[in-house]
Image (cartoon, rainbow, N blue to C red):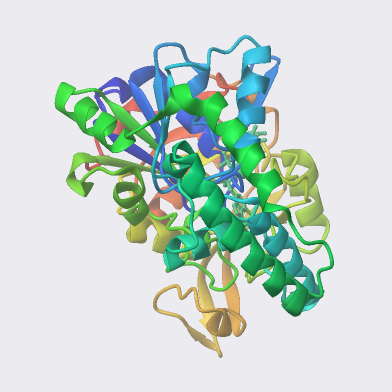
Amino acid sequence: MDFHQLGNTSVIGLQWGDEGKGKIVDLLTEHFDVVVRYAGGANAGHTVRIGHEKFALHLIPSGILRRKVRNIIGPGVALDLEIINTEIDGLRNRGIEVGKNLQISNRSHLVMPYHKKQDRLNEARLGADRKIGTTAKGIGPCYADKMLRSTAFRMGDLYRPDDFRRRLAEVVEDRNKVFAALYGDAEPMDARKIADEYLAYAERLRLHVADTTMSIHDALARGDRMLFEGAQGSLLDLNHGTFPYVTSSTCTSGGVAAGAGIHPSAISSYIGVVKAYATRVGSGPFPTEQLNATGDKIRERGHEYGTTTGRPRRCGWFDAFSARYAVEMSGITQLAVMHLDTLGSFPEVQICTGYRHRGAPLRLFSPDIEILAECEPIYETLPGWDGDLGAITDFEQLPAAARHYLDRLEELLGAPITLVSVGADRMATLHRESRLEMAST
Ligand code: GDP
Ligand code: IMO
Ligand code: MG
């Protein structure tokens, strides 16, 4: 078996986001016809490096970088029209085709300017101690309106301009009152200006807007091969992450079918992406965080600064206990381990294999912050490895200690490692086709 024979496949982050999902999607897209984004929004930042070129994608699926691949933004995505327009322009300016190869669901919910404003105001009101540390992209408020329904706007609404203007005027009037009362905001928003701006975006995007659920079903019927590009990471999942320090969408595999509009049994393979260590941006528990020279060294070697916000990422040792939980939560069938090169040059490396809670080992990982506050990681120490792994092209060429480290991760996580990344570039990837046989697809 090789990657070309994988059925419909989903790529899922198993940590707190930024695992390297963009690189893996770009790499695998060679073998697929369609790439679908199904959850999250412009809070995501997916980086793809091809030679000297670097692309940072927020909303557009990473498949856009390959010719012949169709890209779909599904109804589960929180769509920021300003950002997607900028993204389209940026890609076109660099000679990337963005036309019929990008479809946007008419049912995607719109991130409105007052969502971004509320995100900022709410975080400021919570203050440094209690804020979630969001990306300020309006994701939470947009999904909150989606749940509320009567105050939400979807892409398709923009093609009924009179109704859109009328409803928007009501919503903006209400928001202005709420923001003034709650946050002391003295800069009311102008509904007419927002409507003009959004209706202009809608004209520009008209060519892309479609019933993507129908497109996905047609693709399925034709036997096209589909790759689902996850955003964020399992520990940021709204239901199963470290609530309230999470995002507002389902980032575990349960979100794929719901957000894309496909039945769960149509997806046969779930690739879990992990870094060889752990990072987190924003607030919330991070048991293996290293607030010391080790953390600083990982940050500098791995260039761990956010793609979306530029914030320095918190860094620490690999947490196999929480990653195992994420593997089980999503039914992960195979693993991609990223940034093995970054972990080079440490005399010893550590893996967290479990937590001690009030002195006793915890049976299973718990995402509850009250429990995590009382947990202490249990570490296993392994020998480190030296040398620049970036030039290695074959798994067997890896230093023995690095292979040993991967063997241990495989054992602790309970899924085969089929891809190992040793650099940011598309080419700096070791394919372990032999391990694919073990991936229970
Ligand atoms: P995503 O959100 O999961 O797509 O990940 P991001 O793109 O936000 O962050 C991953 C970062 O690591 C990006 O800057 C990638 O270019 C980079 N990267 C991915 N894989 C590797 C790797 O194996 N080694 C190194 N050094 N960098 C990598
Ligand atoms: P990708 O797809 C890393 C984090 C934020 C914050 C929390 C809530 O690039 O892996 P939000 O703006 O979603 O309300 O913020 O979630 N977060 C991410 N962290 N990578 C991401 O996406 C993230 N998307 C959201 O930092 O802690
Ligand atoms: Mg990212």
x, y percent for residue 50? 61, 17
Residue 56 as seen in the image, left or right of residue 321:
right
Q: Is residue 262 above or below residue 239?
A: above
Whole-percent x and y of residue 324? 41, 60
Q: From the viewer's perspective, is 87 left or right of 260? A: right
Q: Is 21 drawn above or below residue 92 in the view shown?
A: below
Q: Percent x, y for residue 424?
A: 63, 28
Vertical arrangement, residue 389 with respect to residue 105, above or below = above
Residue positioned 59% across, 72% down in the render: 377
Give the farthest residue toward the left.
221
Determine the residue positioned at 59% across, 54% down: 382
The total of numbered circles placed on residues is 0
In the rendered view of the protein, which quadrant contains the C terminus? top left
Task: Tell which quarter ligand 1 is in.
Answer: top right
Residue 176 makes an appearance in the image: yes
Q: Considering only vertical position in the picture, is 16 above or below 12?
A: below
Q: Nearer the viewer, residue 53 or 210?
A: 210
* Residue 157 placement: quadrant: top left
Q: Is residue 47 visible?
A: no
The percent coordinates of residue 342 (x first, y second) are: 68, 39
Q: Nearer the viewer, residue 23 or 74?
A: 74
Answer with the quarter of the image where residue 426 lies: top right
Viewer-proximal residue among 26 and 407:
26
Residue found 55% across the figure and 37% down from its top: 59
